[in-house]
Amino acid sequence: MRRMVEQLKLEASVERIKVSQAAAELQQYCLQNASKDALLVGVPTGSNPFREPRSCAVV
């Protein structure tokens, strides 16, 4: 019971903002950091640690 009261006090003290404001801030953050996102811009092949190693076959 004591833990529940402490948790409720903690949650009551959290500063709240409107959803529209949070969404606008999130959208702005995403737009500002899109150029650093590897899923959007890709990873240079030379620095990709997950690429398949090339094999050389001599016939």
Image (cartoon, helix red, strand yellow):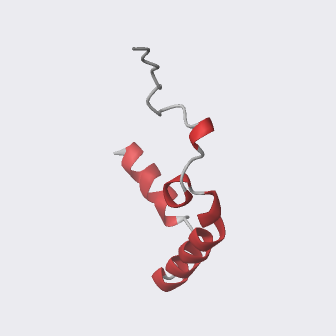
User: Which image quadrant: the N terminus?
Assistant: top left
x, y percent for residue 40? 51, 61
- Which residue of the protein is positioned furthest toward the left in this rendering? 1
Q: Is residue 27 above or below residue 13?
A: below
Answer with left or right where residue 8 lies relative to residue 47: left
Residue 51 in view, yes or no: yes
- In the image, taking residue 58 as reference, residue 16 lies left or right, namely right
Q: Position of residue 38 (x, y in %)?
A: 55, 52
**43 versus 36 height, above or below:** above
Picture coordinates of residue 46 (x, y %)?
61, 37
Instruction: Work out which quarter of the rendered image holds the C terminus and state it.
Output: top left
Instruction: Judge by depth and name the residue closer to the eye, 54 or 25.
Output: 54
The residue located at (55%, 37%) in the rendering is 48
Whether residue 17 is visible to the viewer of this picture, yes or no, is no
Q: Residue furthest bottom?
A: 20
32 or 55, nearer to the observer: 55
Q: Residue at x 46, y 50 (%)?
A: 6
Q: Nearer the viewer, residue 48 or 13?
A: 48
Q: Quadrant of residue 24?
A: bottom right
The residue under the point 55% across, 65% down is 14
Residue 9 spot, x, y in % from top left? 49, 58
Question: As rendered, which of 50 and 13 lies closer to the eye?
Answer: 50
Give the residue at the far front of this rendering.
59
Rendering quarter of residue 26: bottom right
The residue that appears at 63% across and 57% down in the rendered structure is 36
**Total label count?**
0
